[in-house]
Image (tube, rainbow, N blue to C red):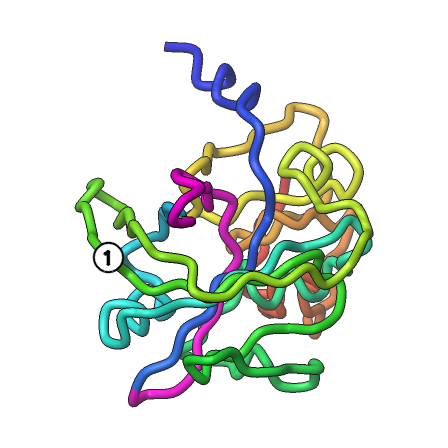
């Protein structure tokens, strides 16, 4: 099977957030799809192990925002390669709340949606949530970021828990690679106090290429 054929499918990039008794959580996904127009419904695929998934299961609601092309990699790094169990991902960003009290980022976002879960399907490593859209708002006229733009222009990596994750190997790569997010530092020596600019992990998480 040619797994690279899946790269021909088009996706966007979204931040999914939810909140339960343990607090707010959020993560980046590339699998959020509208499935009906009237009434408006969406389908979300999200990894079972995510803290955000736990919050959705407990609360029955989630918020989604559409990233724009000018979204900084630091933001994607925080929401895509760090855990809400360890980090308050919303700290330091301009945040508002939707009708369900869920946080959503106001900048570098093209649109937002507030969703209530109607049904759930077990897809193995992921859950598929079917949800009713209760709020929808256009936030910006800037171009939404597609998954292909993220890879081709931003040179972004895919988190291991993403639905479309495939191990990335490059025979031309050299230097040091972060084992968490895939960031490559092109250098002969790795400083002992080096911190990954994407996932914020230390030098002990890097491997020599």
Is-magenta flag for residue 26? yes
Residue behind mark 1:
118
Q: Quick one: label 1, few (<14), some, or many (20+) residues within 10 Å?
A: few
Residue 27 spot, x, y in % from top left: 49, 63
What span is colored magenta in the figure? 21-40
Q: In which quarter of the image is residue 138?
A: bottom right
From the viewer's perspective, tell me whether residue 198 is left or right of residue 100. right
Residue located at (76% from left, 58% from top): 71
Residue located at (64% from left, 73% from top): 105
Residue 184 spot, x, y in % from top left: 70, 47
Is-magenta flag for residue 99? no
Residue located at (81% from left, 53% from top): 141
Frontmost residue, 43 versus 41? 41
Q: Quadrant of residue 21?
A: bottom left
Determine whether 117 is above or below 39 in the image: below
Residue located at (45% from left, 84% from top): 101
Screen quadrant of the C terminus: top right
Q: Is the magenta stretch mostly helix, strand or loop?
A: strand
């Amino acid at each position: 099977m040619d797994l690279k054929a899946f790269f021909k499918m088009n996706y966007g990039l979204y931040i999914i957030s939810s909140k339960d008794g343990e607090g707010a959580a959020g993560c980046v996904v590339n699998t959020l799809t509208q499935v009906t127009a009237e009434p408006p419904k969406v389908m979300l695929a999200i990894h079972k192990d995510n803290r955000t998934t736990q919050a959705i299961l407990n609360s029955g609601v989630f918020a989604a925002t559409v990233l724009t092309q000018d979204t900084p990699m630091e933001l994607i790094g925080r929401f895509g390669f760090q855990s809400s169990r360890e980090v308050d991902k919303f700290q330091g960003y301009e945040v508002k709340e939707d009708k369900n009290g869920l946080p959503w980022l106001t900048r570098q976002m093209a649109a937002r949606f507030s969703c209530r879960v109607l049904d759930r399907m077990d897809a193995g490593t992921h859950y598929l949530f079917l949800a009713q859209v209760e709020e929808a708002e256009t936030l910006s006229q800037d171009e939404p970021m597609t998954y292909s733009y993220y890879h081709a222009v931003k040179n972004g990596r895919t988190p291991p828990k993403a639905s479309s994750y495939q191990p990335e190997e490059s025979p031309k790569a050299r230097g040091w690679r972060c084992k968490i997010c895939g960031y490559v530092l092109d250098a002969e020596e790795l400083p002992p106090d080096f911190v990954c600019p994407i996932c914020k992990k230390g030098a002990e998480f890097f491997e020599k290429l």
